[in-house]
Each structure stands twice: as structure tokens, then as C-alpha cells.
Amino acid sequence: MKFVKKLSYLGVCLLLIGCAQSLSVSNKNTFAQNKSGVIGVFRQPVGFCSGGYQQQIILGGEKIIVKPTWTSAQDNLFSAYIEPGQAEFVSYHYACGMTSTTLTPNFSKGIVIPENGFCKITMSFLKGDSLFSKNDSLLQAHFIKEGVAIPFNDIPYCETY
């Protein structure tokens, strides 16, 4: 019985870890020439209840984890491979206790993913902030903190629409 409990616990841990992973931004191969995508910082509202659950957005048809499980940080680095072209922001999903919420914009807004390579952006749900913005100091701090393999200035800002 103890073995089954330990095996179950290990399985749950692996599931949570697997779900919370994004791209390995410290690996230069992540940013290979033939890959396109986005890297950025997601800002959740201050005092926002997430209960340790991950938060996700759908951008350009991709479900992207913008706040990993078990973190209480307001600002989190996110990254994802996305096909080149317009990447529409479709929804933002978060949970608080037993309540799960999905926010969908009542407007068409998104970013433009370059044909070759990545672009960077800050995405914010803070009151008074724009949904998408260019925030050099915040992005640079997270590039350093997360050990992003590509120099900050080598990744252009995403165009927005």
C-alpha cells in the first residue's frame, strides 16, 4: 500500500511539473533560425487570487502558461512557439479556490509573430496598463533572472494590432 501511495504521489508531481513547463529559454537551440515564437513577461493584477494554480492565455491558437503552478510572483516570464503572422489574443484563464474564470476580450487584439525568430512583449492585466506594451526594464530583468540564451537586444519587440 505504501508503494502505491508513493507511486501515486510521484505521478501527480510529474503531471504538475509537466503541465507547468514552457520552452527552455536558457538553451540557445530554443531560438533556432527555423523557429518562430514569443517571449515575454505576463503581469497579473496585484492581490489577484490564483490559489497556486497556473494561469494560461490562448494566443495565436496556442495555449501558453503565463504563470506557473505554485508561484506567487506577480510578473512571470513566458515563452512559446507560435506560427508566423498575426497571433490573436483569445482568452485568459485563471482559477481561485473552486472557481475557474476565463476572460475573453470583446475586441480583436494581438501581436505579429516574425517569419523567422522570436519577438518579445510585456502583457499586463494591471489596472491602467495596456494589454501589450514594451517595458525594457521589466523584460531585461526577467531575461537576466531566467538566463535567456539570446541577448535582449537580439530579439525585436512584437508588433501589435
Image (cartoon, rainbow, N blue to C red):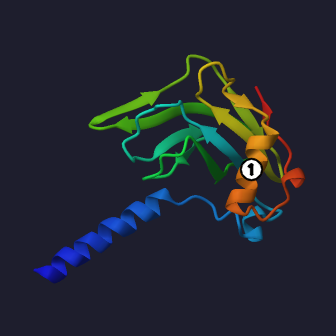
- Near-viewer residue (81 or 77): 77
At a point 61% along the width and 17% down the height, the residue shown is 107
Residue of label 1: 141
- Image coords of residue 144 (percent x, y): 75, 58
Q: Is residue 94 above or below residue 10?
A: above
Rendering quarter of residue 17 = bottom left
Q: Rate crowding at label 1 as few (under 14), some (14 to 19) or many (20 or more) other CA atoms within 10 Å.
A: few
At a point 47% along the width and 26% down the height, the residue shown is 103
Q: Is residue 62 left or right of residue 111?
A: left
Numbered disc 1: secondary structure: helix
At a point 84% along the width and 53% down the height, the residue shown is 152
- Near-viewer residue (156 or 111): 156
Q: Is residue 29 above or below residue 73?
A: below
- Image coords of residue 87 (percent x, y): 68, 37
Q: Is residue 36 visible?
A: no
Q: Is residue 102 above or below residue 15?
A: above
Q: Is residue 145 left or right of residue 116?
A: left
Q: Quadrant where the C terminus lies?
A: top right
Q: Quadrant where the N terminus lies?
A: bottom left
At a point 83% along the width and 41% down the height, the residue shown is 157
- Image coords of residue 73 (percent x, y): 54, 45
Q: Is residue 11 left or right of residue 89?
A: left
